[in-house]
Each structure stands twice: as C-alpha cells, then as structure tokens.
C-alpha cells in the first residue's frame, strides 16, 4: 500500500498574495483522483492518498496539484510534495530540541525541492539577519526565530537569493501535525 503525501504550496494565503481557499484545494485533489484529501490550516497544506489518481510518487502528486491549480484557479504555484518518510526524517533530524519543546511556533522548517549547493550554504551567514540558530539536513533548513518570525530580516526572498533554490516553510507544530495526518491517510 502506498502511503499518503503532504503537499505544500509556496507563498499562498499569506499577506495580500495569492489566495487558494482550502475548499478549492480539496476539490482539486478530489478531481485529480486523490483519496482522503484534507487541508491543514489555511496556508497551503494538503494531505492526500493516491486513490485513483495514478500518482506513484511525489513528482506525480506535485504535477497533478500544480495542473489543478492552474486549471481551476489560473495560478502558477510552486508545489512541493513530501512522503511520510520525508516528514519523519525531517522531524528526526531536528537539531533544536529545546525549540521544539519550548517555542515550537518559532521553529521553522523550510523544505526545498533539492538541497542547495554546499558552497552556498557555507557562505550564507544567518547572523547577518539576527539568527543564531540555523542548521541544515539535506533539503531542509531549521531556523529558530527566538525573537519571533515577524521582526526577522531573514525572509524567503533573502534565502532564495543566497541559496539559489526556493523553499516553503512550516513551523514545528504544523510539520508534526502534517506527519500525523499523512500517517492517518496512508
């Protein structure tokens, strides 16, 4: 049995940006043949099982969701699909146990479609942006925003320029909830 998938949309439903209502996201998944479509929060998080979609892996899921977003809403959105194993590995690799326990809403995991080049990661200095706790594990960065995310100068645009690869961030609470939902649907 193929397990479920967590589908993360980048840059939707934040600020005044692109809107993807949860009902539309679930409908896109259902129209594509996915089973058990569930959304988490209103920030572009979808959990699905393959159902009759024909999807056999994350790339298939990403393609079907991106196509559905374009067809239904006219939006070109970056989409990243993770397996339950991907989420479990990201959770297990967390280097900031204290933040996960004491400050989970300010511990952000940024998922990238592939790891940034090692020389770019090495050259990036998070201290320039007031960040003292940042680490990497493959395509995932872990950033503990101790003073809160809002006042930080470390933005997605800064990371994209520095690393050359986009990413989409979720806080620790959301990541652990997504992992539980993926286990449930799969």
Image (spheres, grey):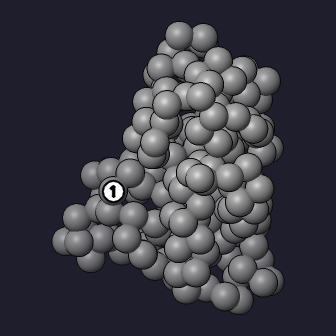
Please indicate whether residue 19 sits to the left or right of residue 5 in the image.
right
Farthest residue, direction left: 119
Relative to 3, residue 15 above or below: above
Please indicate whether residue 113 sits to the left or right of residue 35 in the image.
left
Percent coordinates x, y for residue 158 in the rendering: 41, 53
Percent coordinates x, y for residue 130 in the rendering: 53, 73
Question: Quick one: SS at disc 1?
Answer: loop
Please indicate whether residue 135 sits to the left or right of residue 133 in the image.
left
Farthest residue, direction bottom: 98
Which corner quadrant of the image does residue 133 belong to? bottom right
Circle count = 1
Give the residue displayed 33% in from the left and 51% down from the top.
Answer: 165
Relative to 183, residue 7 above or below: above
Percent coordinates x, y for residue 67 in the rendering: 48, 20
Give the residue displayed 54% in from the left and 40% down from the top.
Answer: 10
Q: Nearer the viewer, residue 134 or 40?
A: 40
Other residues around mark 1 within 10 Å, as few (<14) / some (14–19) / many (≥20): few
Would residue 142 be seen by someone viewing this image from the given angle?
no
Relative to 70, residue 175 above or below: below
The residue identified by callout 1 is 114
Give the residue displayed 42% in from the left and 75% down from the top.
Answer: 136
Give the residue displayed 70% in from the left and 82% down from the top.
Answer: 99
Percent coordinates x, y for residue 52 in the rendering: 59, 28
Would residue 54 be seen by someone viewing this image from the given angle?
yes
């Amino acid at each position: 049995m193929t397990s479920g998938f967590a589908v993360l949309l980048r840059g939707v439903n934040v600020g005044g940006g692109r809107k993807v209502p949860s009902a539309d996201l679930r409908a896109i998944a259902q129209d594509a043949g996915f089973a058990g479509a569930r959304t988490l929060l209103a920030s572009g998080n979808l959990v699905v099982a393959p159902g009759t979609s024909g999807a056999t892996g994350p790339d298939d899921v990403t393609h079907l969701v991106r196509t559905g977003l374009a067809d239904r809403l006219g939006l070109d959105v970056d989409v990243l699909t993770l397996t339950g194993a991907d989420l479990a590995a990201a959770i297990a690799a967390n280097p900031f146990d204290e933040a996960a326990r004491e400050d989970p809403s300010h511990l952000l995991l940024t998922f990238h479609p592939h790891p940034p080049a090692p020389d770019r990661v090495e050259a990036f200095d998070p201290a320039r942006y007031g960040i003292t706790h940042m680490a990497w594990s493959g395509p995932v960065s872990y950033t503990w925003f101790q003073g809160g995310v809002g006042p930080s100068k470390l933005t997605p645009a800064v990371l994209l320029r520095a690393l050359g690869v986009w990413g989409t961030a979720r806080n620790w609470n959301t990541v652990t909830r997504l992992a539980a939902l993926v286990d449930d649907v799969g």
